[in-house]
Amino acid sequence: MTIATALTKKLKIEHPVLLAPMAGVAGGALAAAVSNAGGLGIVGGGYGERESLERELIAAGNTPVGVGFITWSLRKNPDLLHVAMAHAPKAMFLSFGELTDFAPVIKQAGIPLIAQVQTLAQARRAADEGADIIVAQGAEAGGHGSTRSTMPFVPAVADAVGDIPVVAAGGIADGRGLAAALMLGASGVLCGTAFFASRESLAHANMKRGAIEGEGDNTQRSSVIDVARGIDWPSQWTIRTLRNEFTDRWGGDMAGLQRNIAEERPRYMAARDAGDTSVSAVIVGEAVDLVRADESAAEIVARIVAQAEAVMRSAQDLLT
Ligand SMILES: Cc1cc2nc3c(=O)[nH]c(=O)nc-3n(C[C@H](O)[C@H](O)[C@H](O)COP(=O)(O)O)c2cc1C
């Protein structure tokens, strides 16, 4: 038995599970593994490093994968869109910024456009601009996001965008989450945290261990690590990570971090390269409670789908 939805039909995939385009984590090997397992893998285009994008697209081999960009960052380096499109992606994914400059180019090429949104207003705009699939991202998500919660946000987006398939994101890392998302009116899920520690993920081994040992209670949204890394994120989006010594030290004193940035930035970057999780934060969301050790992406996809099928079947017993 499989779970057939508007999403699986639109993308011609077997399972309604998409890999989030995680910068520095979702490379070609992970994206290809998710696609080969019947979902759709999406390579994280990150902050516009052409060399790493080309390397990861080549690493995906002949497996069809999508490519995701951080829209405000892509605007600074729009040529990357063409680099991605030259690899005939199965879909283009845009999040965090206006679609206007890019949607027509993607649509003209006949490539499905997936837009990730954090507000209802953004969902309506994405629908108007021709998004083929809309990802409703709740604040539980790992990485950047905003303030709406997945549970009420997903059905509201589904109501707002008519026939466009909606995908739920934020806090979903097992089959219970997939089944719940389908009940909320979504036709699939987009997962980041669930795949962060997978064997194919590009994350540093210490970061993967940090995720496996981490708890959702210990995650928080802030801008500390963006200031530390010197990435100029618009203030409407913050980043959810596990707390650590660094985020605890500076979370309540951003002005102090700015004053000390000459020492703190190199310290943060060195810690990131070395996988020192006491300084460089593990970027995962509340669903980190559900992340397990040593699984391949294929095992994760199979586990999510099998559990969703089982809980949906057993839910029928609730009907009398
Ligand atoms: C490590 C990490 C990096 C991420 N990087 C990106 C990114 O580069 N672009 C993007 O659109 N979303 C990014 N996200 C957010 C995902 O697109 C997605 O919304 C999120 O992972 C879903 O929530 P979950 O982590 O609970 O599964 C990232 C998430 C994580 C965990």
Image: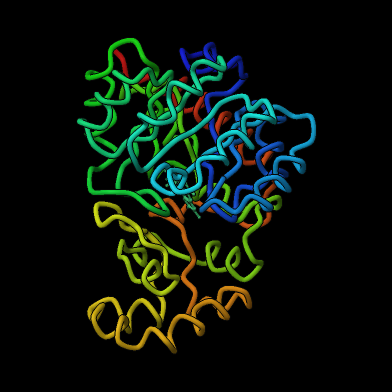
* Horizontal side of residue 54 vs 40, given as left or right: right
Q: Position of residue 206 (x, y in %)?
A: 62, 71
Q: Position of residue 127 (x, y in %)?
A: 31, 20
Q: Quadrant of residue 217?
A: bottom left
**Residue at image point 51% right, 23% down:** 106
130 and 77: which is toward the camera: 77
Q: Position of residue 179 (x, y in %)?
A: 42, 28
Check the image and report above or below for 86 versus 108.
below
124 and 176: which is toward the camera: 124
Check the image and report above or below for 8 versus 292.
above
Q: Quadrant of residue 167?
A: top left
**Residue at image point 63% right, 27% down:** 89
**Looking at the image, which residue sits at the far right?**
61
28 and 229: which is toward the camera: 229
Q: Position of residue 309 (x, y in %)?
A: 52, 24
**Residue at image point 35% right, 58% down:** 233
Q: Is residue 316 visible from the viewing direction of this image?
A: no
Q: Is residue 82 visible from the viewing direction of this image?
A: yes
